[in-house]
């Protein structure tokens, strides 16, 4: 969250001592309240409290968990002790951000007047408004993911770090796959899932945000298998606590039942742990089920030609990571070799690809992919704020010099 | 004044609405990913006799083809007396399919039978020469449970250079007995052949998570690997003539060592804790090459230890005879950061023996990342 600078009131705050208008409408009261400097201060204090609490809570939730609970939420929710009931206990980042934005905009529309003398303040505040909007847009529109490439491997999609989907793919066509991607949140309920592209329906039987799988053959007195088809017929899924640790992953897992017009087709166990999709043939077409990281396909391909991991001579201290990527656009207009290294990202197709890491004994390069249509807004806002401050101070300075010159001129010369 | 308020309200409402978003089901068409191996596809119930992969077979009369799972290349119901049926499956894995003892004991576990030792293997496995190659066959009878008839597994596997095929019939004892001749005839019908158009080649799927379970004592799927630059890891430098293989979820590294038409497999895995301790691991490997276990006191006589790059290595070299020929396992255990790393070279005795110095040099290159 970006704190806003308290707006300087152009008019004195209404006080109890001030004469009240005879007929103040409700809207007028609302406008005055929304433009109030007291509201600004209150919101800033609430923001401080929220940031402080969220910082402490990072111990339990980690960075991502805190972002979701406090900053990317309208309200901070907490469970009523002894129950599963969640109640809002504090305004979240979206409420505070929107309220600060509303406060700033209303203060300008309500109280400020356009004038050359105040142009610097206008520009500065406009920059602040833009900054708040940019932060909101980033929270809503930014998508982070990764592309993992072995040397010689080609990818055309970005995989999400945290979001998962159940992909139901018709892979019959030799050249194309028809994919229906179902967000895993849809598996939380028991509602049957239908889609025009699917000749069958899917009914979630159970969903675990994190789970482990146990082979029944290695369990003593194993429970009966839930899955009747696929790789899960000899596996039992066991729910596991959600982890927020940055170096651990959750393994979402679900049981889904497929049903065609002729009746049930079976129950499948789908899990992010199972690396390969599970196939089956239905009505003469080959289908695949896979619970996987959410994929965002891009209209180009990335092929890793070479990965270098340099260290300082005589040490194990990393000096440089770099991936030589062959970028090829689907329309054939782009086909070039690009070097992605630390602080030297590739920007293409709305994405920025950063060299983020490596794995597999230096044979796999990990690129972080960030798509943020509003990534330029903070630069523009900062430029506007700087311009506004320079203008405002410049105007004050010139006013000061003018007054001093006038004062000098007005002093009578000594005899 | 009202106009100003309307402007404010409109701006705030627009922003508030923009903040509301919900992920929805999406459908799209994408070109096939050239880097992704084609996934397994089972047999279409309507396409009886379809045989994916490089093997094909003749479906015996009376067997009902079934819609099968992703791991199954073939699935049938074999009829028996009184309308009972036995389940017949054909499953293939890329790479090695585990050792003979592990396969037998896995099937015994499915029948609630205790595992057998390597010394008992010869009495439990038979070899069968068929047109497709050298099958190993096991006939395992379970115990009757709670008045139900005993279950029985008649299983066979066929190892090819890059994959292993499992053929298994499982059902009530009398049904399997009635279908035994048909099942053996089914094995005889297996022959090399091309995959049908439009049916993905199951052998191209790469090793499944179940692969390498001989190194995963009772915790194969419980381990959540944390692969990535952030996770504590080791690094190494493999000899230039070892060919890197694709990594699976369970393997940190994988190499093929080939010479003179023979192939050995080097697997690098890591699991939390001591994974049963030194003796348990050493004896498991000894059992895999048909050697008797040694007790804790004698474990030092069959292992060597050394320190390198701040790591403590315990090296095992065991050779023995298995139904598929003389085999050797050369392996090292490295406890590090609360986990145990395994570097295990498995293959024909002659080949693994010739790689001994290369393996030793390879171990010296291992260091914390």
Image (tube, rainbow, N blue to C red):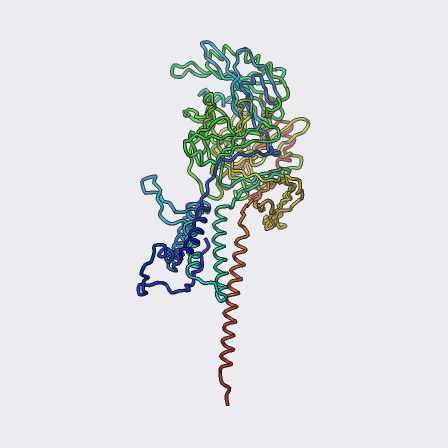
- Percent from the top left, x then y, of residue A387? 53, 62
Q: Residue at x 34, y 56 (%)?
A: A25
> Which of these two is toward me, A314 or A114?
A114
Q: Residue at x 57, y 14 (%)?
A: B59
> Which of these two is toward me, A192 or B264?
A192
- The number of numbered badges drawn on the structure is 0
* Up-down relation of residue A313 to residue B327 (above or below): below
- Percent from the top left, x then y, of residue A246? 48, 44
* Up-down relation of residue B174 to residue A367 (above or below): above
Residue A234 visible, this orientation: no
> Which of these two is toward me, A405 or B188?
A405
> Which of these two is toward me, A329 or B177?
A329
- Percent from the top left, x then y, of residue A98? 43, 51
Horizontally, is A276 left or right of A203 in the view? Answer: right
**Looking at the image, which residue sits at the far right?**
B260
Residue A164 visible, this orientation: yes
* Up-down relation of residue A31 to residue B338 (above or below): below
Q: Quadrant of residue B205?
A: top right
- Percent from the top left, x then y, of residue B157? 56, 20
């Amino acid at each position: 969250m970006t704190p806003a600078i308290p707006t300087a009131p152009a008019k004195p705050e209404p006080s109890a001592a001030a004469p009240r208008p005879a007929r103040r409408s409700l809207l007028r009261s609302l406008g005055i309240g929304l433009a109030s400097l007291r509201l600004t201060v209150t919101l800033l204090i609430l923001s401080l409290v929220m940031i402080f609490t969220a910082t402490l809570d990072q111990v339990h939730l980690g960075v991502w968990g805190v972002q979701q609970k406090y900053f990317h939420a309208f309200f901070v929710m907490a469970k009523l002790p002894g129950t599963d009931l969640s109640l809002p206990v504090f305004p979240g980042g979206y409420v505070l951000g929107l309220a600060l934005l509303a406060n700033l905009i209303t203060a300008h529309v309500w109280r400020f007047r356009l004038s050359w003398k105040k142009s610097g303040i206008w520009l500065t505040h406009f920059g602040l408004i833009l900054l708040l909007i940019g932060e909101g847009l980033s929270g809503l529109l930014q998508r982070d993911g990764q592309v993992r490439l072995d040397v010689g491997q080609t990818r055309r999609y970005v995989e999400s770090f945290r979001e998962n989907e159940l992909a139901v793919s018709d892979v019959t066509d030799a050249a194309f796959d028809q994919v229906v991607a179902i967000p895993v949140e849809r598996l939380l309920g028991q509602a049957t899932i239908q889609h025009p592209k699917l000749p069958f329906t899917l009914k979630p039987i159970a969903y675990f945000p994190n789970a482990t799988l146990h082979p029944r053959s290695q369990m003593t007195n194993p429970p009966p298998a839930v899955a009747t088809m696929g790789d899960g017929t000899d596996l039992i899924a066991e729910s596991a606590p959600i982890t927020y640790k940055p170096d651990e992953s959750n393994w979402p897992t679900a049981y889904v039942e497929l049903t065609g017009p002729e009746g049930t087709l079976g129950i499948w166990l789908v899990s992010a742990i199972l690396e390969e999709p599970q196939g089956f043939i239905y009505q003469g077409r080959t289908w695949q089920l896979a619970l996987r990281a959410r994929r965002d396909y891009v209209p180009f391909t990335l092929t890793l030609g070479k990965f270098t991991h340099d260290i300082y001579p005589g040490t194990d201290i990393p000096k440089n990571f770099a991936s030589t990527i062959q970028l090829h656009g689907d329309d054939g207009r782009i086909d070039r070799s690009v070097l992605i290294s630390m602080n030297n990202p590739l920007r293409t197709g709305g994405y920025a690809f950063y060299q983020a890491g490596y794995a597999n004994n230096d044979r796999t390069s990990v690129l972080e992919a960030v798509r943020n249509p509003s990534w330029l807004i903070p630069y523009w806002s900062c430029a506007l704020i700087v311009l506004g401050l320079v203008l405002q101070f410049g105007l004050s300075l010139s006013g000061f010099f003018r007054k001093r010159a006038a004062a000098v001129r007005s002093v009578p010369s000594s005899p | 004044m009202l106009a100003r308020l309307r402007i404010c309200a409109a701006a705030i409402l627009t922003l508030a609405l923009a903040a509301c978003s919900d992920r929805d089901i999406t459908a799209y068409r994408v070109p096939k990913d050239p880097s992704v191996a084609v996934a397994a596809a089972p047999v279409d119930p309507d396409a009886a006799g379809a045989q994916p992969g490089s093997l094909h077979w003749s479906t015996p009369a009376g067997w009902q083809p079934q819609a099968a799972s992703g791991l199954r290349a073939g699935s049938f119901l074999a009829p028996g007396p009184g309308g009972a049926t036995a389940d017949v499956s054909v499953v293939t894995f890329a790479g090695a399919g585990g050792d003979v003892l592990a396969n037998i004991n896995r099937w015994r576990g499915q029948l609630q039978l205790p595992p057998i030792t390597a010394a008992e293997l010869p009495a439990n496995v038979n070899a069968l020469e068929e047109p497709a190659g050298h099958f190993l066959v096991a006939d395992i009878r379970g115990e009757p449970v709670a008045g139900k008839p005993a279950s029985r597994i008649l299983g066979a596997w066929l190892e090819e250079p890059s994959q292993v095929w499992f053929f298994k019939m499982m059902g009530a004892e009398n049904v399997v007995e009635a279908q035994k001749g048909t099942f053996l005839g089914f094995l005889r019908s297996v022959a090399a052949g091309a995959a049908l158009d439009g049916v993905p080649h199951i052998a191209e799927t790469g090793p499944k998570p179940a692969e390498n379970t001989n190194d995963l004592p009772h915790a194969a799927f419980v381990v959540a690997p944390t692969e990535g630059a952030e996770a504590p890891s080791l690094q190494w430098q493999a000899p230039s003539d070892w060919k890197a293989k694709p990594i699976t979820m369970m393997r940190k590294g994988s190499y093929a060592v080939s010479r003179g038409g023979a192939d050995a497999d080097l697997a690098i895995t890591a699991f939390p804790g001591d994974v049963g301790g030194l003796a348990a691991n050493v004896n498991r490997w000894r059992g895999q090459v048909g050697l008797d276990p040694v007790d804790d006191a004698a474990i030092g006589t069959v292992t060597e230890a050394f320190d390198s790059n701040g790591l403590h290595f315990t090296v095992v070299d065991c050779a023995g005879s298995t139904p598929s020929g003389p085999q050797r396992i050369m392996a090292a255990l490295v406890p590090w950061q609360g986990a145990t790393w395994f570097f295990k070279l498995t293959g024909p005795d002659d080949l693994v023996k010739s790689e001994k110095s290369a393996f030793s040099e390879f171990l010296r290159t291992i260091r914390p990342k």
